[in-house]
Image (cartoon, rainbow, N blue to C red):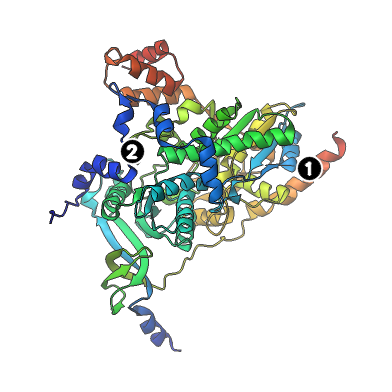
Amino acid sequence: MSKEKESIIEESAVSGDWVEIWKVILEPGERASQVPEDTQKVPLEMRMRGFLVNERANLGESVSIRTRIGRLVEGKLVSLHPRYNHTFGEPQKELLAIGQELRTLLKKEGDGDE
Amino acid sequence: MSKPLAQSYEAVMARKGEIMRKAIGIDYSLFEFGKLGFDYEAMMGSVAYSLEETARIQRAAGVGNTPLLELRNLTALAREVAPPGKGARIFIKDEAANPSGSFKARRAALSVYEAERRGYPGVIAATSGNYGAAVASQAAMRGIPCLIVQEVFDSRGQGQPEIIEKSRVCEAYGAEVLQLSVGPELFYVFLQLLEETGFFNASLYTPFGIAGVETLGYELVEQTCRLTGQVPDAVVVTHAGGGNVTGTARGLRKAGCSAQVIGASIDLKGLHMASDRDFNRKSFTTGHTGFGLPFAICPDRSDVPRNAARPLRYLDRYVTVTQGEAFYITEALAQLEGLERGPAGNTSLAAAFALAQELRKDQVIVVQETEYTGAGKHPQAQLTFARENGIEVRRGDPHDSVPGKNIIIPVHPAQIQVKDLELDHIRQSYLKNVVGETPYASLTEQDKEYLALETRWNQARIEEVLHHFG
């Protein structure tokens, strides 16, 4: 499948597809007064996942979703078939060393003591 | 037809009291007296369930009765670095064995039971932590709808991996998850949702949320006695919102155990919890001082009118450890004890490893929780994320740690040490916050007694402190 065709397919969703929407809840000027300065400068945003209600929609369009518990929520379509991308991360050499160090320490000290 | 209610931030916040009353079904004013006090024990007694009832509700939902495990190798390691004769036996309550993978299942079990019993159409909770999974799991068991509101990402759209994992697990249990960017206005969205859905507010801080933890403390004493023939000398509790400390300590007392209750938090000094920039510069999203201190000082600034978590009433000592120390001990727990568990729950283990070295070898110290681990909720995931956010990660002396700048993994277990936070200073801040400008002399006798119970200080000392700061 060509790249172009793939991207066309990935840019539109049909009714019932699992999608992610996004919207702004509070604009920068509407933030609570106790919020620190850096947070004041940015909007309060929301993201949610659910089943597309519209018959067909493209990324970036305003759509409705039905959530897992049946609520209807509107927002901009930002992701189709959204996946979780969190992982176990990369191996960390600072951690990898610890097990052997501790076993050595226990063995060595344990030999003489008690 | 009634007019639609105004949805601006100010309008919704102004309806807070009314929305809360409907969503919790507790009339907090019944327990309030004087200018600032309330009858805490009456509230706990009249609203929550007895220990026996709580245990029964939890058992029916597969919650509780988790194993207490002796950490023989970590004890041996602590004794290697402890002064002669020192190094208490370290035990851990494996709360990861609960249905949703943490002790939070205990809190959720009661709240969801209560929601169903009173006929609410669903449950809702504002939580970025393990509690979301717990409510979602319990709601799934009872077949009632569940909505979880989380603070997940910053203005770049970058999510904290630990919280993204919690979004995933809530969805896995069939809950709706509403993800928000950084900011305390999460509460505004939460109120709107309560109003729209009519769901029960399964807050962490209702009497149900706290009474649910009492079984943990109670079981822990019974199990320690069975395994060692003695009661615990110290119990270490990861401290964030205060419910873990409060519920556990109440359970210990109900079991007749006077063990020292030691709270432990990750030191995140210098990072602002509502800052868009700081949000992703921390590697722990709970169990840290960003919750531990404000919730001790201002307990009632939670999502309920009167917080049933009152950590200052129960803490005998409050210590911090660094992010690097908690990651180190998490690795040690996996490698030496064969228990791979989540890093946030191991905050108290890191502290206990150091605290055991203050106690004699014939004494017993109990770490009262573990939590599940997984993608995102793992030291490797968190350290990878930290590096991507410009945090320096290296081996070294954890005392050189600066939250938000670096994470220092100890080079030797002897470097794991606790830092004591002055509970008296926290009590002073609490008093300043609660009493404010109100002259002490104008308070009622009941108010004064209330403050004494809250601070564990006598009235003369409270008056002196308020006078000094007034």
Image x and y of residue B101, in percent: 56, 52
Q: Amino acid at mark 2?
A: Ile
Q: Quadrant of residue B34?
A: top left
Residue at (43% x, 27% y) in the render: B41
Residue B26 is marked as 2
In what element is the residue under mark 1?
helix
Q: Amino acid at mark 1?
A: Leu
Residue at (49% x, 33% y) in the render: B246
Pointer 1 local density, CA inside 10 Å: few below 14, some 14–19, many at least 20: some
Can the viewer see residue B285 in this picture? no
In what element is the residue under mark 2?
loop
Pointer 2 local density, CA inside 10 Å: few below 14, some 14–19, many at least 20: some
- In-image side of B250 versus A40 (left or right): right
Image x and y of residue B194, in percent: 30, 50
- In-image side of B24 versus B331 (left or right): left
Nearer-the-camera pick, A11 or B207: B207
Image x and y of residue B430, in percent: 38, 26
- In-image side of B286 versus B412 (left or right): left
Q: Disc 1 is attached to a residue of which chain?
A: A
Which residue is outermost to the bottom?
A1
Residue A106 is marked as 1
In this rendering, is residue B40 above or below A63? above
Residue at (40% x, 36% y) in the render: B47
Q: Quadrant of residue B224?
A: top right
Q: Nearer the viewer, mark 1 or mark 2?
A: 2
